[in-house]
Image (cartoon, rainbow, N blue to C red):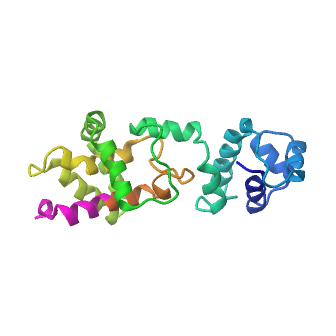
Amino acid sequence: MLISQVLALLDEANLSPEELASTIGVSGMTIRRWIKKPKRSAVPPVYIPAIRDACYTLISSGRLRADSTVVRVLLLQAPSGEYRAALQNLGLRGDFDVQTEMSQDDMLTGLTLIGTQSKKQSEVESHRAEIFSFKRLGDEWSQRIANLWLVIASKKLKRLEKAVAFGALFYLLTPIDFIPDNIPFFGLLDDFGVLGIAVAYYKSRLPEIYT
């Protein structure tokens, strides 16, 4: 992480050095020292987790946009404990490839990795009511969830063929969002988008499910 990237964060959030220092948990003098350094200087590694956490705080408070270039650059460096916790909860390995943007095939690969885990499948099947409660969010939500549940319940498909559906529905159950708005995972796609990709996958490759 470079000093120039931290200064870009300072400018984009329209913060004073003291405000940024308070958010990071350092002294205002520390930030002012960084301002005087060459822009290509590296930030001491000990501060990187705190700077990343500051990004989360500033996004939550509306001072930063989750999709800004500055945020993406900073959050792609040295995944935080929150990010690692999300990966662990989803059952993905810690070195799962983190990209600002991923193709739909990449996203489907991630969903498959999650959905092939028997424990995740069991959690989806045992939390049907909780999953269906998301239907209250609107007709599109209801249709996507219903379409994926048809996959789960289908007698025409093998267990492995249901992996994408299991992966997408398990996302709704995870206590740490599959793609929190401030974590660059699956290209900052939200849960509604994940469901849409999974439904499109089945409608294009296995349309017989819906006939």
Q: Is residue 157 found left or right of 175 in the rendered image? A: left
From this view, report whether residue 203 is shown above or below residue 159: below
Residue 69 within the segment the image draws in magenta = no
Residue range in magenta is 198-211
Q: Is residue 63 found left or right of 182 in the rendered image? A: right
**Image-quadrant location for residue 102:** bottom left
The reply to whether residue 41 is visible in this rendering is yes
Q: Nearer the viewer, residue 125 or 4?
A: 4
Residue 210 within the segment the image draws in magenta = yes
Image quarter (top left, top right, bottom left or bottom right) of the C terminus: bottom left
Q: What residue is at 28 percent from the left and 41 percent from the top?
A: 124
Give how far across and how far down residue 90 sits, in percent: 40, 39
Give how far across and how far down residue 178 sits, in percent: 44, 47
Q: How many numbered marks have been drawn onto this rendered protein structure?
A: 0
Q: What residue is at 27 percent from the left and 41 percent from the top?
A: 116
From this view, report whether residue 158 is shown above or below residue 12: above
Give how far across and how far down residue 97 sits, in percent: 46, 47
Q: What residue is at 33 percent from the left and 54 percent from the top?
A: 108
**Image-quadrant location for residue 191:** bottom left
The reply to whether residue 137 is visible in this rendering is no
